[in-house]
Image (cartoon, rainbow, N blue to C red):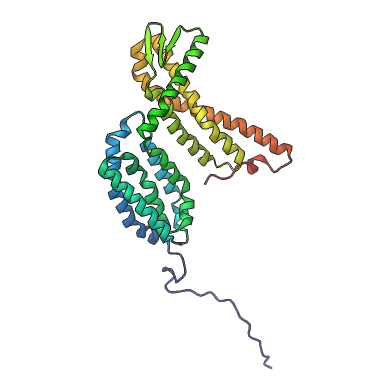
């Protein structure tokens, strides 16, 4: 005896013949998206490779701007690290804002390149990249790459007017503190303006030793450290950011004292030779160690504060995964 069976909708597995191609409304696969960016990458290379080559042969060889290629390399590396997330961004172009930034950046580039104004030529890369991201993908891509774009600011050379205005008081402060500390330690040190006298030697605290350039580059290092650590707490980040400039200043005073002591004990040739250049690396190591020590002390304080409040485990409460 036959029984009627009611028909119910049954889920079916449908295999499309064109499963290798994105259907309408789907996000294209990553390789295709990267091919769309290839002409843009070639255009940016044609624009900025001559500028970078010129900087490598000139400005980047000076002590004041030696950090420039490092900043550029780090920014490009950070962008490369975001490539998978960038490929997954749903395109929502912002043509008005994108074209505004792109035209402004290209105008700065043309003006800087034609008139040899490095401030405009180098800084133009930031609005050009931001404008391109807005035109291709929209605001989500700019938000994703905000830190690499911001980090490129440290590649921009400081204008001479600002450099001259800030260098003189910094040199005075560095010279004063170095002289006071060495004199308190028992060394025969005297000071006339920015000229330090130790024994039979006289040392001039030059612009490169004023601390301004080291503050600029160490600020970049400190912000990169915070970005890579990825702390979620506002106060911890704020305190570390506020400590970057004082830490850089203290490290520079230590560098000047180090050079004075080398000159006093081993002679002028030792103080002005290889050790003078090596002291720049020592400066960065000292500043980074001070910043890491301060970070550890703040970490202990915030962990204890969180434990006293009965919050979740510290390792999950005050740190998040580095983006």
Quarter of the image for residue 307 reads top right
> Is residue 256 left or right of 3 when viewed as pictured?
left
> Is residue 274 left or right of 174 when viewed as pictured?
left
Residue shown at 37% from the left, 24% from the top:
207
Residue shown at 41% from the left, 26% from the top:
167
Q: Residue furthest left?
A: 114
> Is residue 106 left or right of 8 when viewed as pictured?
left
Image coordinates of residue 47 in percent, x first then y, are 29, 49
* Viewer-nearest residue: 205 or 168: 168
Above or below: residue 317 compared with residue 41? above
Quarter of the image for residue 119 reads top left
Q: Is residue 136 visible?
A: no
* Viewer-nearest residue: 45 or 189: 189
Above or below: residue 169 compared with residue 147? above
Residue shown at 47% from the left, 56% from the top:
139
Above or below: residue 257 compared with residue 92? above
The quadrant the N terminus occupies is bottom right
Image coordinates of residue 235 in percent, x first then y, are 61, 38
Quarter of the image for residue 233 reads top right
Q: Is residue 107 visible?
A: yes
Looking at the image, how many numbered discs can be counted on the residues?
A: 0
């Amino acid at each position: 005896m036959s029984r009627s069976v009611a028909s119910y909708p049954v889920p079916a597995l449908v295999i499309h013949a064109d499963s290798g191609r994105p259907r309408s409304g789907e996000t294209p696969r990553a390789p295709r998206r990267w091919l769309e960016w290839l002409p843009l990458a070639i255009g940016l290379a044609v624009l900025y490779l001559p500028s970078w080559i010129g900087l490598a042969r000139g400005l980047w060889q000076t002590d004041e701007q030696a950090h420039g290629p490092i900043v550029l390399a780090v920014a490009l590396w950070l962008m490369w690290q975001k490539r998978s997330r960038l490929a997954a961004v749903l395109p929502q172009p912002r043509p008005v804002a994108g074209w505004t930034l792109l035209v402004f950046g290209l105008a700065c580039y043309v003006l800087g390149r034609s008139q040899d104004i490095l401030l405009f030529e180098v800084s133009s890369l930031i609005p050009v990249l931001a404008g391109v991201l807005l035109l291709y993908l929209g605001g989500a891509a700019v938000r994703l790459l905000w830190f690499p774009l911001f980090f490129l600011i440290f590649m921009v050379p400081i204008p001479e007017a600002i450099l001259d205005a800030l260098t003189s008081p910094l040199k005075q402060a560095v010279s004063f503190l170095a002289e006071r500390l060495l004199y308190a330690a028992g060394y025969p040190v005297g000071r006339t303006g920015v000229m330090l006298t130790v024994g039979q030697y006289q040392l001039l605290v030059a612009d490169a030793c004023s601390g301004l350039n080291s503050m600029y580059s160490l600020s970049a290092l400190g912000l990169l450290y915070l970005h890579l650590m990825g702390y979620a707490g506002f106060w911890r980040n704020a305190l570390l950011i506020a400590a970057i400039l004082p830490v850089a200043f203290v490290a520079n005073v230590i560098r000047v004292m180090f050079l004075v002591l080398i000159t006093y004990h081993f002679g002028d040739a030792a103080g002005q030779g290889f050790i003078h250049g090596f002291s720049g690396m020592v400066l960065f190591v000292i500043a980074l160690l001070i910043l890491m020590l301060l970070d550890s002390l703040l970490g202990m304080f915030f962990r204890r504060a969180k434990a006293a409040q009965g919050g979740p485990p510290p390792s999950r409460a005050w740190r998040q995964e580095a983006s």
